[in-house]
Structures are given as structure tokens and as C-alpha cells.
Amino acid sequence: MSLKNCKRCGKLFNIRGYTYNVCKDCLEKDNADFERLRQYILTHPYASVLELSQETGVEPAVITRFHREGRFINREKQEGNLLCAQCGAPVPAGQFCKECGTQTPRKNR
Ligand SMILES: [Zn+2]
Ligand SMILES: [Zn+2]
């Protein structure tokens, strides 16, 4: 079984030696959409799906699929690059993660 439904047009295509969720015909459109989203997210890292869709013209279903496929995650990791000063866990903002933040870190009394 190496057939799969294209996530864009629904067509069955052969996935042997092929790792995408869309058929070859749609791959170009998919990549173009992704590139537009990527550009927008560079300057608006916390844009919602709705905002992204309105600003880039990419269908919300396509955006949520990219999210599901984890295509945005690597970029966010690279850009965020914030780690807890105590345990090294990634944090969205600030110096400490939630756990270390509540333990009054580095406060010698
Ligand atoms: Zn397709
Ligand atoms: Zn921590």
C-alpha cells in the first residue's frame, strides 16, 4: 500500500520514495504557500491562523496542516532560542522556566 490522498486536491498518488502529504502537482503550490507564510511569520511570529490566512491568502486548512506537520516548529525553536538559566529547558520568555521560576532560583538568603 503506497497510495495516499493528496491533502490539497484529494487525488490519489504514489508515495513510494516520496515524503510529502500532497501530490506532485500540488507540491509547488504547497511550497509557495509555505514560503509566503514563512515570510509573514518572520515579522509576525505570533500571528493567528486567521490573521495568517487573511494576510497571505493561504487557506486556513493549509495553515493548520502545516502546523500539524510541524513545519513551523523548527523555525520557532531557532528564533526563540531562550533557555531556562537554571535547568536549560526552553522557555517562551524570561530567564527561568515555570518550574524554576516558582522556586525562587539563585536567591541565597
Ligand atoms: Zn494534489
Ligand atoms: Zn528551569
Image: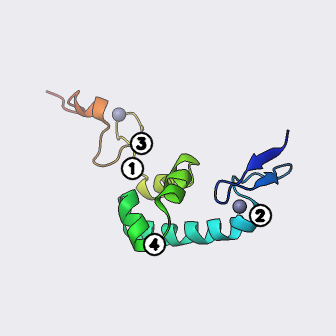
Residue 26: quarter of image: bottom right
Single out the mark in the foreground, 4 or 3: 4
Q: Is 99 positioned to the left or the right of 83 in the image? A: left
Whether residues under marks 1 and 2 lie with C-beta atoms below 8 angstroms apart, the answer is no
The image shows residue 103 at horizontal and vertical percentages of 23, 27
Whether residues under marks 2 and 3 lie with C-beta atoms below 8 angstroms apart, the answer is no
Residue 97: quarter of image: top left
Q: Which residue is mark 3?
A: 90
Residue 82: mark: 1
Residue 46: quarter of image: bottom left
What is the C-alpha distance between the residues marked 4 and 3? 29 Å
The image shows residue 21 at horizontal and vertical percentages of 69, 52
Q: Which residue is mark 2?
A: 24
The image shows residue 91 at horizontal and vertical percentages of 36, 43
Q: Which residue is mark 4?
A: 56
Rendered residue at 67%/60% (across/down): 9
Give the residue type at disc 1. Answer: Leu
